[in-house]
Image (cartoon, rainbow, N blue to C red):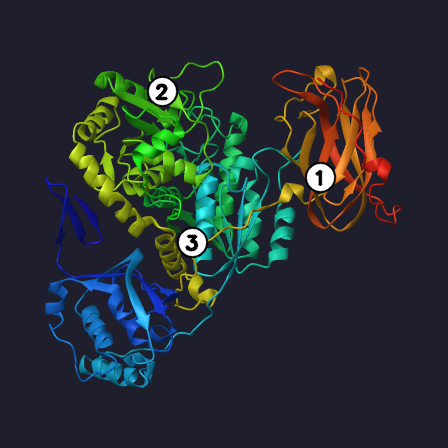
Amino acid sequence: EHVIETLTLVPSDEGRFEVSVNGGLIFVAGVCELYKDGSLVHRHLTSCSNGPLPLLDLLDLGGCWLRGQFFYQPEVLFTRDIWERAGAHVREDAFYSMDYELWLRFAHAGARLHVIGAPIARFRLHDQQKTAGDYQSELPTVRDAFAHERAITPGTSRSPGRDRLRVALFNDIGYAYGAGIAHRRVGASLAAMGHQVVAVAATGTLPTREDARVTGPEALRALAAIDPDLVVVGNLHGARISPEVLGVIADRYPTIFVLHDLWMLTGRCAYPGPCDAYRSRRGCSSDCTCAPGYPDLAPDLIADAWESKRRVISSASRLILAGDSRFVAHAASGALATDGACTRTLAKPQVTWLKYGFETDALYPRDKALCRELLGLPKDRFLIMSSASSLDDERKGLAHLAAALQRLNLKDATVVCAGRVPDGQEPPIRAMRAMGYMDDPQRLAMLYSACDLFVGPSLEEAFGQVFVEAAACGTPSVGYPVGGVPEAITHGVTGLVADRVHPDALADAIAALYNDPVRRLSIARFAPIHVRSEWSIVSAAHRLVEVLRETGLEDSLDLGRKITIHNTNPTMPEPECLALMEPCWRAVSGFDAWEGPYPELGLPRCRWMLGPVGRFQLNAPEAGMYRLVIRYVNNEPGQILRLRTPNWTSADRSIPLTAPGEKSVIAFPVSLSRGINDLELHAWRWQEGQRQMSLLIKDIRAVRSPALQSRPRAGTAAEAKPTPQPSA
């Protein structure tokens, strides 16, 4: 039994759901799709907040009702109880406004609204409908009569406001990994409503310069170019960005900092476990007993880090903290309730929570047998999916899953993980297949759909997007009652939450679904409907509107009340990488991972170019002529290099072997456009074997060359003709 507002869903033995209502005063609204001449022309969602139907807002015709905070009559559902309490009739003399007058009576009678982020009605627009005429002139008369009858003063109309904001997303490494995916989804919720969204990341998943840390002035320069009305900041610790950068941003712009974990509240820990030192007056210190983990920090720096973070979040004038779950928001509120030494005289920021959406065009149920065939998974096994594949991260709880399965001894079960087992390490579960990291939502949805059950045994979790993703694909979930997991799993509807954190409890929950195929089928049918209603991009957009209203940003940004859903799955712009703001390079393909430094060899951080072609990008601050300077080590006799851009090819250049201790450098003149430039470095010789190493790259730099006044000539016949490539 799970309560949403006051609506209760009770699964029956037959796999159906019976609906019971606590108090009966339920008013549900969803997306209304408007069609004209057979084509979709508009999607409407009310901007009324969840909770009591807002009578004063409904009475504000000029600032709310006629500015978008209204209901199309077909997009609402309501219970008989509220209908009867409000008089069980409509005013037939209100030719245009009988539904509006009914909603006023519902609000006066105490109706509670619940908004879902899924289509609930299709509304046809045509020239003969009543509201094609002058329907607005009747509204004030009906409104005034209602207010006069009940001695209500409507109040002053709010400003109509604007419909569109310019929003900057800022985080550490862009859209990679869980927090990056969540960051992108927050941006998609804003873009779905038509707001202009621009993304900026400090760096990428691999460093792009020797020191990839971003300073406050760098961040402000990038944001100034966007000139945002609002900045949404995500994770910072993936790039080791100082918390002071957040303070600098929030002093300049209205800023929502999304807490994807608890790092900003602690000295060093993203997940502090049972330790509550971060909530104490003294705060985190070198006495921290939490296990060292990502991100690591020397013990003697922990106290200063806690003080610095607390100072930032307690003094930034335009900062709002938004947990990615109610659990995280509660943890933040609790942490800030204690006045530490550095915050005794400082204000505390507002704390709220928001939702992540999910991509409904990618994450949906697929044919189980077909998905197994395409992914090469066995058709006759009970497949249990998990999101971790290594015992190294104790927080992920894979050891608990291993213990639970050992107790159950399911002869036909195989564990499938969206991850990889580190080289040289035995799989932690005997019957386990690691599928590798999946950043393609379509392929991820295939894996969810191929499995019978998803088990996320995390011992700590801020929210748990994976449980929502699994439900969207019709796969039941099991998880522990920790952090935001009970919010991500709707118990009994999308899966089961174990009754305690112990492998035996996890085993019991797994067994309950393993032994009950009818219940699994019921969840598979209803879970996608439920999460589409509660966790879609549209539902997340509605929650963001509530956040802007609750925090006062709606008024300070002069934002209107109309929600138009322009796209239910908007394409997000790729983040601009600040570590590429100077003319340095980023590998695209044909390069191995960064390694080193190796002081004993006199080598800085470096990486191998593999095989014949290395593709990379340069970000030039302005268009013009540059010298592309490559610092390298060459171990291949007879090595030849060539540089290629989309519209120019250099002459072939022979380079000698690099002697021990020698600093080898080669420079190519090149014309670069402002912004990102795609380039290729071609090599003629490389080592045979698993790693086809052709050239060890120390650094690639573009140096502005005012002396080069003209663009390099298009490749001459001699330049364009490739040097014959030796056979293997």
Q: Residues within 10 Å of mark 3 (few under 14, many from 20)?
A: many
Q: CA distance from mark 3 to mark 1?
A: 34 Å
Q: Is residue 342 visible?
A: no
Q: Position of residue 248 (x, y in %)?
A: 58, 50
Which residue was labeled with disc 3?
189
Which residue shows up at 31% across the image and 22% down it? 414
Q: Which residue is mark 2?
A: 432
Corner quadrant of residue 703? top right
- Name the spot of residue 423 as percent of width and height, x first: 49, 17
In the rendered structure, which amino acid carries the disc numbered 1? Leu
Mark 3 or 1: in front is 1
**In this rendering, is residue 222 above or below 279?**
below
What mark, if any, has residue 679 been given in the picture? Answer: 1
Give 153 or 441, whichever is nearer the viewer.
441
Quote the CA–CA distance across marks 1 and 2. Answer: 41 Å
C-alpha span from label 3 to label 2: 36 Å
> In the shown orientation, is residue 512 left or right of residue 154?
left
Q: Earlier in the sequence, mark 1 or mark 2?
A: 2
Question: Where in the figure is residue 547, as x and y percent of width and height?
Answer: 39, 56
Q: Are marks 3 and 1 in contact (CB under 8 Å)?
A: no
Q: Is residue 245 left or right of residue 122?
A: right
